[in-house]
Amino acid sequence: MTIIYQDQDGRAASSEASGVEIPVRRITFTVNGRKTVAEVEPRLLLSHLIRRGLGLTGTHMGCDTTNCGACTVLVDGRPVKSCTMLAVQADGHEISTVEGLATASELHPLQEGFKEEHGLQCGFCTPGMMMAAKALLDANPDPTEEDVRWALSGNLCRCTGYQNIVKSVLWAAAKLRAESGS
Ligand code: FES
Ligand code: FES
C-alpha cells in the first residue's frame, strides 16, 4: 500500500497541489500487519497519518496534547499516544490499531469484555483503552486490578468512570487465559 500524505490541515503535500514547496519523506512501516509506504511531511503527526492518510478512524483524537490517550496505538507492541509521535518516526516499525483487534468473524476478547462488562458509553475513549489494555495483556496475561488501573492510567474516560473498564479488561484476561489453557 502506498499513500502520499498531506499536512495536518489536510493540504496535499505536493508542491503542485499546494503551490508551496513542502519537503516529504518516504517511510515504510506495517499497519495491522500490512506493509505500507507513505510520503509524509516531517511535521506530520502519526495520529493524523493513521486517521486521514490511512483512513483508520478507530484511532480517536481527543486532545492532541498527550493528555487523553484516545489516540493510543501500539508501536512494536508498546502503547504510544500517536499524537506524541511524528509519522516519520514510524519508519521501519510495526503499528497496531484498534482495527487490527478483531478477525473477519470474531471480536477480540477485549472487545467482548467491553461489551459484556459495559465498559463503554459514548465509546470515544474505548479504542485507546483497548490498545493500552492489549499491551498489558500481551505482557502480563494475569494482571491484578491494580495492574490494570496502572496500565490505563494514561487514558481518560469522560463517561463511565473506570470501574467497568477495569472489569472489562479483567474479563478479557480471563477469557484469553481460558483460550490458551493457562
Ligand atoms: Fe493523543 Fe489525546 S489525542 S493523547
Ligand atoms: Fe465515553 Fe469513555 S466511554 S469517554
Image (spheres, rainbow, N blue to C red):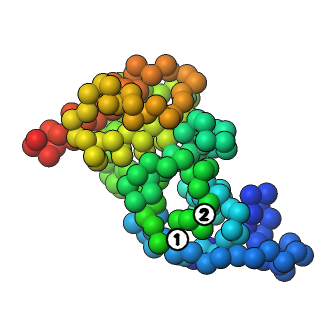
> Disc 2 marks which residue?
87
Q: How far is disc 1 from disc 2 in space, using C-alphas?
A: 8 Å
> Which SS class for mark 1?
loop
Image coordinates for residue 168, horizontal then vertical, percent: 34, 29
Is residue 25 something one can see in this rendering? yes
In the rendered view, does 156 fall on the left or right side of 63?
left
- Number of numbered discs on residues: 2
Q: Quadrant of the C terminus?
A: top left
Q: Is mark 2 within 8 Å of ligand 1?
A: no
Q: Residues within 10 Å of mark 1 (few under 14, many from 20)?
A: some
Q: Is residue 81 above or below residue 51?
A: above
Q: Position of residue 91 (x, y in %)?
A: 52, 71
Foreground residue among 114 and 37: 37
Q: Secondary structure at mark 2?
A: helix
Per the image, the residue denoted by label 1 is 91
Amino acid type at circle 1 is: Asp
Q: Residue furthest right?
A: 19
Query: Looking at numbered disc 2 in the image, what kind of residue is underneath it?
Result: Ala
Q: Quadrant of residue 119?
A: top left
Residue at screen point 80% across, 65% down: 11
* Residue at 60% over, 50% down: 84
* Residue drawn at the location 50% of the way across and 35% of the way down: 154
Say above or below: 64 vs 2: above
Q: Quadrant of ligand 1?
A: top right
Measured as percent of width and height from the top left, residue 116 is found at 33, 27
